[in-house]
Amino acid sequence: MESSLSYKIALALVPGIGGVLARNLLEYCGNAEQIFSESLKSLMKIPGIGEVNARRIKNVKVFDLVEKELKFINKYKIDVLFYSDDNYPGRLKSCPDAPIILFSKGSMHLNCKKVISIVGTRNATDYGKLICEKLIRDFSKRDCSVLIVSGLAYGIDIHAHKWALKLNIPTVGVLGHGLDKLYPSLHSDIARKMLLNGGLVTDFPSGTRIDPNNFIRRNRIIAGLSDATIVIESAEKGGALITADIAFSYNRDVFAFPGRINDIYSRGCNRLIFRNGASLIQGIEDLEYFMGWDNIAIKKSCDIEKLSDLAPDERRIVELLGKKEKLLIDQISSTVKLPVSKVSNILMNLEIKNILTVLPGNMYKLR
């Protein structure tokens, strides 16, 4: 197990090999260990690798870093989620630039039924804080199983984490550095409490320097882990808008709370709504409407008489959508273990039978 983990971590630490190239290597070689067993010439033949990256892979010095990281992982009981592992978050796995590895600590369930990202300005106003608090209180009143994801930053992020903790809703903070430190350090106490009901996750190894660019890279994980991203407040520029744009590019739902036209920290939200980068919401009722959560009980039953008339593969897909509300075709294919081409034909038949509908972004859900 330790040997297998070493190669997985090594793949993530090779300079120049990001998530896309790493997945390409896995596709050609089968597993992380086999990648490092390939000859230089064989590696060079893999599309996108070339001589420079092949030599980086064959450089044994990377395993010095791996040894250091393994000591840190074992000492602090860090969980490692590799792209091909069953417990790797399914939503993130469907993103084209998903990280090959995640390091996490806590009691989180990243594949739970509902995951929402709440992001916003670091300069949260009383208006933004009130919206954030009310939204999370409403989640608590609904008694629905939801995971709240944010970035543990100043402002809206930390406000979302705090209220989730107060109301016993699991919450996960995505970091722009390794798990050996916490930035900002002022939030260390909140982060420790989150480990008991949620946790911390990052794709950066220990020893990573605090760098502004890392937090932009971190935003793709916030967006990718979630069914939807909600922007509470944002100026015309900021990390929250970057997260929203990334979520939109992943065909995820994006929502924004509007504000007055002369409020600096509502201009970003208003702009998102204006250019159709986000749907306007005013509370949890709007969110439930857009996400289809208000009809979950009906969808789960999904007309038993109709189900009895379906072919086995059709029934499996309908039952899956009854549990997940809406999914991309790749997610359906991966879950039911059928080729995308076959799933596409089944989905078309189910649409003709008026059992499911297609949403923007090629998302499928039951009627």
Image (cartoon, grey):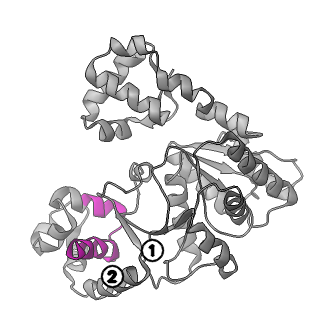
Residue at 49% x, 63% y is: 107
Please give the residue where the numbered disc 2 appears in the rendered image: 70
Judge from the rendering whether residue 86 lies leftward or rightward of residue 144; answer left or right: left
SS category of the residue bearing label 2: helix
Give the residue at mark 1. 204
Rendered image quadrant of residue 186: bottom right
Image position, residue 302 (x, y; %): 47, 20
Near-viewer residue (19 or 1): 1
Circle 1 SS class = loop
Work out whether mark 2 precedes mark 1 in sequence or the reverse, and give the earlier one: 2
Bounds of the magenta segment: 1-24
- Establish if 81 lies above or below 340: below
Asked whether residue 53 is drawn in magenta, I would say no
Q: Amino acid at mark 2?
A: Leu
- 250 left or right of 188 in image: left
Q: Quadrant of residue 30?
A: bottom left
* Image side of residue 3 versus residue 354, left or right: left
Q: Is residue 177 above or below residue 254?
A: below
| CB atoms of marks 2 and 1 within 8 Å | no
Residue 196 position (above or below residue 64): above
Q: Position of residue 52 (x, y in %)?
A: 24, 76
Quadrant housing residue 122:
bottom right
